[in-house]
Image: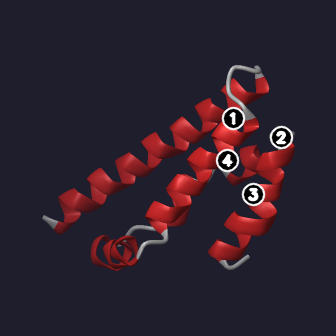
Amino acid sequence: MTEAMSGTSKSCFFCVREFILDALEEANQGRFSQRSVVNLLESILQVITDPKAKRSETLWDIDCQQVWPMQQLKASGLTKVANFLKHRLLPAAGV
């Protein structure tokens, strides 16, 4: 079961990662506001830093930080996303 859950969890991370990339693209195209993207990122951050998520990381040998497409976030050109990275995501990740 642990092996199956680990694979499922890793697949979920890739889905979340793609969702973040889609949101960045929508914001760059003017179809999403930067605030909407930051709200999405904050929600994801809250989920993956929850103590239950931390236990899952150990139990299923997963790394929740894999959800973040860091290169794309840094290169997004979105001011509010850059501020989120600097003030919320990087400190939470211990960077």
How far apart marks 4 and 2 lie (CA) works out to 10 Å
Q: Relative to 60, is 39 on the left or the right?
A: right
* One can see residue 74 in this view: no
Which label is found at residue 84?
A: 3
Q: Residue 38: image x %, image y %?
A: 67, 47
Q: Residue 79: image x %, image y %?
A: 86, 45
Which badge, 1 or 3, is on the more N-terminal residue? 1
Q: Is residue 45 above or below residue 12?
A: below
Question: Which residue position holds label 1?
Answer: 24
**Quarter where residue 47 is shown:** bottom left
Mark 2 element type = loop
Which badge, 2 or 3, is on the more N-terminal residue? 2
Mark 3 element type = helix
Tell me whether the residue at label 4 lies in contact with that at label 2, contact meaning CB atoms closer than 8 angstroms: no
The nearer-to-camera label among 4 and 1 is 4
* One can see residue 20 in this view: yes
Q: Is residue 44 above or below residue 50?
A: above
Tell me whether the residue at label 4 lies in contact with that at label 1, contact meaning CB atoms closer than 8 angstroms: no
Question: Which residue position holds label 4?
Answer: 38
Three-letter residue code for mark 1: Leu
Question: Which residue position holds label 2?
Answer: 78
